[in-house]
Image (cartoon, rainbow, N blue to C red):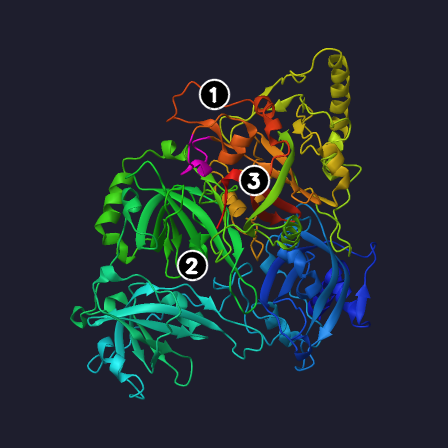
Amino acid sequence: MEDNASCSSLASGLSESSFLRRTLERLTSTQSLKLGSDETVPVAVVAIQRYLSEQAEDQQHHQVDSYCYDVTITDGVWRVKCFLQPHLNHLVHRNTLKTGSDISITQCSFVYNERRLGHGYICIDKLRCKAGGSAVLPRIKDVGSLPILVKRGMERSVVLQSDVPLQISRKHYLSLWNNDDPEGDMWISTAPSSDPVLDVSKVTLLSSLESSLGILRKPLPLLVKIIHKSRLRYYGKFGLKIDYPYQAYFEVADQSGTMSLVLWNELCPEFYQRLNVGTVLYLQNYTLKQSYSNRSRPQMDHHRMKNFNSVEIGLNPRKPASVITVVSPKGVQPQWGLPEVSYQFTTRSELEKLANNSACDVIGLVTFVGRVERVKSKGNKGPEKYWTYRWVHAVDGTSDHPFILELFSSSQTEIFNHICPMTYLVCTQMRVCQAEGSLPYLTSSCETEMFITGYHKGQPYVSDTRVKSFIQWTKTLKDNIILQKTAVGGHYCYPHPPQKFAQSSADASGQVPLVAAADLKRELETLQYREHKKLAIQGQITAVRCMSNLKTSQFKETEEKECEQAAPDPNNPASMAEQTVVDTLASSPSDCSSASRGKRRIQMSKAAQFGPNRNSTPSKRRFIQENTEKRGEQEEEEKTDSVLEEVQCEKNAPLQSSDQDSNILSWESSSWSKQRKEVSEHLDQGGLYQDSISRKFTFDEKNDLLQWGNLQPMRWTPEQTADSIPPARCPGYYQLTILGINKQIAVDAAFFPIVHSDDPCAVGLPRDPHDNTMLSCLSSGFLCPVSGAANHSKTTPPEPEGMLLTASELEDTHVVCMLDICHLGGDKVEILINKVYRVTEVSLD
């Protein structure tokens, strides 16, 4: 009796202290619950899970979101999985609603499943996102130990709080940011411990299957070895009545040759992660069909085996149900005559000799790892999907240049997310890309696999002579010397732009599209988290500002009041100071130029000069106070105007820190003062963020740097502390205002010139000398000469004020600006100028 009373008392206490429990109880008496500001309590987001949405018949001709999201939240007492209303999906798309942060629910409802008894869930109709770290999560030791909140009488649906979507017509979740990575507990990675006895006396060879197509109903068993493995392909779409629409290709071999094998549907979760290169399979009840021709294939000439490309083997979960036996390495017999897995490792010194699109395998020591970005898949007829990728540099000691690797996700999440400097990286089936004006680089294919330190053991390539040679070379290295040459994250774009901008009227694939200013506006509005695009616009550069501080982010309240910034605590001076910085950021960048900018001159005050590299701490110098062209009776007037403008800038300029010593050095065209009043819209998103600058790698900060460079995780863990990385010090950059050619829309973009050879962006950059005018720097992307150990020139890079003295060359000059845009999450959109073309550098085909 005492135990029952104690349990009842505990449950009552949990109910009274839990905001989520009280909210669920109130929902039992109302269809929809609106919560006032005095009723809302912050709850923490611990998981965001994505799945293909349902499309009703009446929605087929209307625009609907391709995916739905289930959001798991906790108030520190209970946790509950809720359905996010589709009109709030854009908060996930822009990483405003994210794991590890707090939200306030202002309206919710309870939805019953009308086609199934005992199933319902809370639906979030409106919410507010809180800026900064979570106030709830630091109080929780183990989120997984918190009880799951369900409505009374629906306890059986508690299983739906784990790994199954709330809309139960879908059976599984997708990875949050792409469709290629396996996600959830259903993906089995361990093989059975026992080895069954195999009857290999009646196996058939691959060479006999081509002639068996359409003849044999039940072909004889196969005994084959996997020599290539593709990434997963998710082919789900609206109306498709398949629970697990997955597919994966393998190339298998026996003593007679090679053939493609296809793993279908629910066999993928069961077997995909157990089937690896070198794995031996005993296959029964497979099917044969004509090979699908419109797909990529690995290049296998180095295997020196016959390829049977007209037929492929199908492994299906039913009709017939294939029987797949994974043979353990100890169970493989030499008399089976299965071929060895072969590789074609290429050294960096040999890369220039390889033909475009040829395949190779590489091994190298990683020195640079870029942040993970996304690009929308082209030509996709189903629901929109994104590829995730990152850029990596790796050295092998055979060349002064590194391998430049464009690595797309290969369905190896753990490896892809843990690539970091100082690790040994192996990439197979990489394709060579030759680019005009740049060093050749390698991009991954559908059959690429990656392996890093900790994953090499047991891989077939460990006995390759070139791998052994590489390992011997690494033994001669000193870690502290290599560490000095490492970098992580930041903006990175490759290959470098060509010398001439070409706009083809025919097939424009692979070219940077030239868009109207209005189109650029739409692109910025629809850009999703870490989505990267290259675009070009034509117009005039009407203003240049030398900036010495990085931009910071603020949460902007949306029109629907779905997202708002937490109010500063008046009792907390740090909170009030932070709000002051945010208020300063909110002012328009053009405010400080509204005094008397009609005169063509350079406004000069104190600013940080460009340091020796992007990671160094900038020194501050006194810039010259007035334009050298001032003279005569105008001199005193100009001095007075300059002082007034400096005061105005200090009040209104969007300085990105509270450092009062960092002011602004700028130039603008003589017509900009008038044109500014006539533009219909000024897209004020130019600037450089913490995420834009690469950082030196250190082992002490390894985990934080990995989190910082990776995408926002779909599940919160206590290790999610990337905010603890010390802020980068900005060596300075230029913010340019580009006025569209029709003078209706202007856009701000940042120009971050390369100044040091250690910068990852400097690799492969054409180094033709130039005169360091503003236009020549914008055209080349670097300050001449680029400093570094290999550059012994006594010439020093120009001072910012010297460059701005040449900015008058931009006056009324028609240019084409190539832009890199990337959504960094929240309200941060990075717009960087990659290259500026004069009209004489544009070719019309």
Amino acid beneath label 1: Thr
Q: Is residue 466 visible?
A: yes
Determine which residue is flagged by label 3. 833
Of 694 and 843, the residue lying toward us: 843
Q: Earlier in the sequence, mark 3 or mark 2?
A: 2
For the point 74% across and 16% down, which residue is it?
639
Residue segment shown in magenta: 756-768
Q: Quadrant of the N terminus?
A: bottom right
Give the SS element for disc 3. Answer: strand
Whole-Å distance between the Cαs marked 3 and 2? Answer: 30 Å
In the image, is 204 to the left or to the right of 823? left
For the point 76% across and 65% down, which residue is it?
108
Q: Quadrant of residue 307?
A: bottom left
User: How crowded is the residue under tag 3: few (<14 C-alpha within 10 Å), some, or many (20+)?
Assistant: many
Whole-Å distance between the Cαs marked 3 and 1? Answer: 24 Å
Determine which residue is flagged by label 1. 796
Determine which residue is flagged by label 2. 410
Counting from the top left corner in percent of width and height, residue 397 is at 29, 38
Q: Earlier in the sequence, mark 1 or mark 2?
A: 2
Q: Nearer the viewer, mark 1 or mark 2?
A: 1
> Magenta segment, principal secondary structure?
loop
Of 113 and 547, the residue lying toward us: 547
In the image, is 142 to the left or to the right of 510? right
Q: Nearer the viewer, mark 3 or mark 2?
A: 3
